[in-house]
């Protein structure tokens, strides 16, 4: 068992993993010297421990405590290089555009032209009277660092985050809840599940409902030589194609080759035009997507398709939307050859029907009925596919009138997954308001604004409002029925409880439905839209990249866009190191050997308030060709106490002050990322994730950010969902957690899988 992996998974749930049984804990024990030293190290990183964990630690060896400390230090990046380009960067260096121009000219014509100055290790001549070199850790002209730091500040944080105890049973509970999640797993949950799959055997009745989750399990079973068991999770040809594409690309969603090739070209597009590398990027992606399979893989897929339980015409209809991909897959996997073998009759029948197109598609029949304005037939066909009905509900309401469409939809509403109903309720207000900007987020991750439906113009404002309210009433009524019908494992109605406690903070956390984040959170599992209160007068953004990579040019940028009261914009970025209420630590464009490098931005709340700033948008970008660097870490720090900036090397990182941080995953496809918004007046930071394709913050669409914030604000909160549960099950709310039969706290919400269990209708 890999304790390091389990420790890191537990830390995401604000816990420490100990291989111990709770009944063996002596709650009267006194803390040992190693435990006290361990707690001191935790405090330096911004953590404290619960009473139960404190006593449990007394039964752990000093070596295990050292392992846990090292794991936490690794997660918090304590051993990385946090030195920026400028020493004591809270005091501006005074560099100007003229300094860069003079240095450029000096390096073109050299000392022979009469330029005198200092030649740095990177080879650049810095003329006298330009940059104050004593203030820099590297070259101010090319952004190459020469000095690194081997320390960080510790213990300056004003608010400690409590860690609780996680046992094997707790991790197994997380494991099963992730497997049975009713919503798609985000990158953090996916990474946790992949690690837990390596440590725990797959439960007999895992209850896997999400196709994307099934792909992770199938991959493990195939690696273990249990492809036969994996076939039980493959219900349709789409499942088979999804796995094949996940195996090829690492994406659990089927992204068509042309989309990936086009996206690769965009990643290599710069402000001054496409580089020669853009062609290479497209060729590299095409080469990567070449379909090559050995005989073992071909036979495995042939057996999977041959074992599908559905009739051939139905299976062929499911294959139709991805027909082009299937044609190539069939050839690459030699399925025609295997279909002629004995025992593969079902596969032969499927291929015959697919190639002869001897099948009808329900979508085609629905489209014909719509064109003829045949309401009865359209609704009859849609009711056969509840999921399809849900996805086109709004458009159908506008075309045929909600009074006729909604009763038909209500007939099948309880057949739909709760997450899909919640998505409809969350989206209704924006969809039926023609003035609101709606967002489309394709599977490549980049967010695009979309135009309102033209049919909205046919209805009055009052009619549109009634439509939105009707959808909300419908999904709330369905959720209420689901909660009322919950049953215990023994068949009795759930719950037997009479009182409920709902933590007030849960009313500020949206239910994570439709917000599939692609970054990994190593110190928490906060849901997108979570609001963090600013404790002090300063917020310090940080960006660290290059961990584990050899020294090379690799330019990642940290930026902040400040929106003032008159809608004027101020930008703090590599091209403008100081602006109202913000200071930048300098632009680094190359990374040192293995330990990475860092950039910071300091935001002063008093200065922003004095300038009547509305909000500040946090972004990070890949200025270099390609996407954001894997393992790039970005986040912000905050403390009621002053946070130090080193005058010697500029280090300004303190793990105890970190309020939130995320890590870019290997599957990232974006070139830029909006990762937070500071509401200056409320002194709150909203964590969000909005990818975009641009090498600077100017590519982040302000309207899209505001639309995403509005979308998060209008979403059903976890607290509101629990209110529906309490009313449906006739539970009386109480004001203290220890007085309630059922208690829902912020710690409970740290595990998003628990929220999805609530959506599943599981009893507490």
Image (tube, helix red, strand yellow):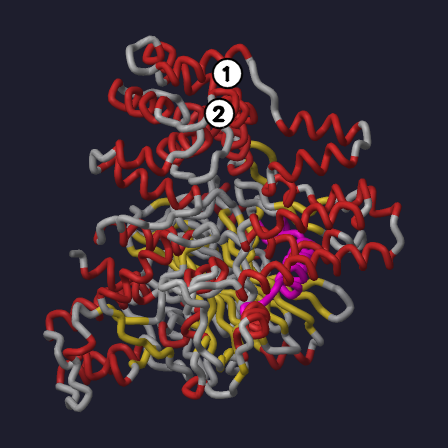
On screen, residue 447 versus residue 457, left or right, reads left
Q: Front-most of 17 and 608? A: 17
On screen, residue 428 versus residue 748, left or right, reads right
Residue appearing at x 40%, y 49% in the figure:
665
> Where is 488 relative to 209, above or below?
below
Q: Front-most of 60 and 465? A: 465
Nearest to N terminus: mark 2 or mark 1: 2
Please indicate, yes or no, whether residue 60 appears anywhere in the rendered image.
yes
**Quarter residue 39 falls in:** bottom left
Q: Which mark is drawn over residue 315?
A: 2
- The picture places residue 137, in percent across and down from the top left corner, at 38, 62
Position of the C terminus by quadrant? bottom left
Q: In the image, is residue 717 part of the stretch drawn in magenta? A: yes
Q: In the image, is residue 84 part of the stretch drawn in magenta? A: no
> Where is 764 relative to 131, above or below?
below
Which secondary structure, mark 1?
A: helix
Residue appearing at x 42%, y 52% in the figure:
187
Residue appearing at x 53%, y 77% in the figure:
505
Please indicate, yes or no, whether residue 128 appears anywhere in the rendered image.
no
**Quarter residue 472 falls in:** bottom right
Pointer 2 and pointer 1: residues touching (CB < 8 Å)?
Answer: yes
Q: Name the residue under label 1.
A: 354
> Where is 600 relative to 363, above or below?
below
On screen, residue 301 versus residue 268, left or right, reads left
Residue appearing at x 51%, y 67% in the figure:
601
Q: How dense is the environment of label 1, judged by Cα within 10 Å: few (below 14), some, or many (20 and up)?
A: many
- The picture places residue 345, in percent across and down from the top left corner, at 36, 14
Position of the N terminus by quadrant? bottom left
Residue farthest front in this picture: 491
- Find the magenta span and give its range: 696-718
- The picture places residue 151, in percent across and down from the top left corner, at 29, 70
């Amino acid at each position: 068992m890999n304790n390091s992996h389990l420790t890191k998974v537990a830390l995401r749930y604000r816990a420490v993993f100990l291989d111990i049984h709770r009944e063996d804990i002596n709650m009267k024990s006194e803390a040992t010297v190693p435990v006290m030293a361990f707690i001191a190290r935790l405090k330096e990183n911004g953590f404290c421990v619960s009473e139960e964990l404190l006593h449990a630690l007394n039964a752990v060896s000093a070596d295990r405590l050292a392992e846990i400390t090292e794991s936490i230090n690794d997660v918090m990046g304590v051993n990385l290089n946090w030195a920026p380009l400028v020493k004591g960067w809270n005091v501006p260096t005074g560099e100007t555009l003229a300094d860069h121009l003079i240095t450029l000219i000096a390096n073109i014509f050299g000392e022979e032209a009469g330029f005198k100055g200092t030649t740095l290790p990177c080879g650049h001549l810095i003329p006298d009277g330009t940059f104050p070199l004593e203030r820099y850790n590297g070259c101010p002209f090319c952004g190459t660092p020469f000095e690194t730091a081997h320390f960080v500040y510790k213990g300056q944080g004003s608010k400690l985050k409590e860690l609780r105890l996680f046992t094997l049973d707790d991790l197994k509970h997380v494991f099963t809840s992730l497997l049975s999640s009713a919503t798609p797993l985000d990158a953090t949950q996916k990474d946790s599940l992949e690690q837990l799959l390596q440590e725990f055997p797959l439960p007999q009745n895992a209850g896997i409902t999400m196709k994307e989750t099934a792909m992770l399990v199938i991959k493990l079973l195939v690696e273990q030589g249990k492809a036969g068991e994996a076939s039980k999770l493959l219900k349709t040809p789409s499942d088979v194609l999804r796995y094949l594409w996940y195996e090829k690309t690492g994406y659990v969603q089927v992204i068509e080759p042309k989309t990936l090739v086009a996206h690769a070209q965009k990643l290599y597009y710069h402000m001054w035009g496409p580089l020669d590398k853009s062609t290479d990027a497209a060729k590299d992606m095409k080469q990567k997507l070449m379909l090559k399979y050995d005989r073992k893989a071909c036979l495995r897929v042939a057996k999977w398709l041959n074992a599908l339980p559905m009739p051939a015409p139905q299976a062929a209809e499911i294959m139709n939307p991805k027909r082009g991909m299937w044609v190539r897959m069939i050839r690459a996997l030699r399925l025609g050859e295997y279909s002629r073998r004995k025992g593969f009759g079902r596969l032969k029948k499927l291929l015959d029907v697919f190639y002869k197109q001897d099948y009808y598609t329900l979508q085609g029949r629905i489209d014909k009925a719509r064109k003829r304005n045949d309401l009865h037939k359209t609704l009859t066909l849609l009711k056969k596919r509840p999921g399809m009905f849900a996805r086109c509900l709004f458009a159908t309401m506008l075309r045929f009138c909600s009074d006729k469409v909604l009763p038909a939809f209500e007939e099948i509403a309880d057949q739909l997954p709760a997450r899909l109903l919640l998505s409809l309720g969350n989206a209704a207000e924006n969809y039926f308001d023609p003035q609101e900007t709606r967002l489309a987020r394709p599977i490549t991750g980049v967010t695009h604004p979309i135009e309102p439906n033209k049919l909205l113009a046919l209805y009055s404002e009052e009619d549109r409002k009634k439509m939105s309210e009707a959808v909300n009433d419908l999904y709330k009524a369905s959720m209420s029925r689901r909660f009322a019908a919950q049953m215990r494992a023994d068949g009795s109605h759930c719950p037997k409880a009479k009182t409920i406690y709902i933590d007030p903070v849960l009313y500020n956390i949206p239910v994570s439905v439709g917000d599939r984040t692609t970054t990994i959170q190593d110190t928490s599992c906060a849901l997108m839209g979570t609001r963090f209160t600013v404790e002090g007068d300063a917020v310090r953004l940080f960006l660290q990249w290059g961990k584990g990579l050899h020294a090379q040019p690799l330019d990642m940028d940290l930026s902040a866009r400040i929106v003032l009261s008159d809608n004027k914009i101020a930008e703090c970025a590599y091209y403008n190191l100081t602006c109202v209420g913000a200071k930048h630590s300098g632009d680094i464009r190359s990374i040192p050997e293995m330990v990475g490098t860092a950039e910071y931005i300091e935001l002063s709340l008093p200065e922003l308030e004095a300038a009547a700033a509305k909000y500040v948008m946090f972004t990070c970008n890949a200025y270099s060709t390609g996407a954001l660097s894997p393992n790039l870490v970005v986040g912000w720090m905050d403390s009621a106490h002053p946070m130090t900036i080193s005058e010697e090397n500029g280090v300004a990182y303190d793990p105890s002050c970190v309020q939130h941080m995320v890590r870019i995953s290997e599957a990232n496809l974006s070139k830029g990322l909006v990762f937070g918004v500071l509401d200056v007046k409320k002194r709150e930071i909203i964590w969000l994730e909005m990818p975009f394709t641009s090498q600077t913050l100017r590519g982040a669409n302000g309207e899209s950010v505001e639309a995403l914030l509005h979308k998060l604000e209008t979403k059903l909160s976890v607290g509101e969902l629990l209110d529906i549960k309490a009313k449906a099950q006739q539970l009386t709310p109480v004001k203290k957690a220890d007085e309630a039969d059922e208690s829902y706290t912020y710690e409970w919400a740290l595990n998003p899988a628990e929220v999805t269990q609530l959506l599943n209708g599981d009893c507490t």
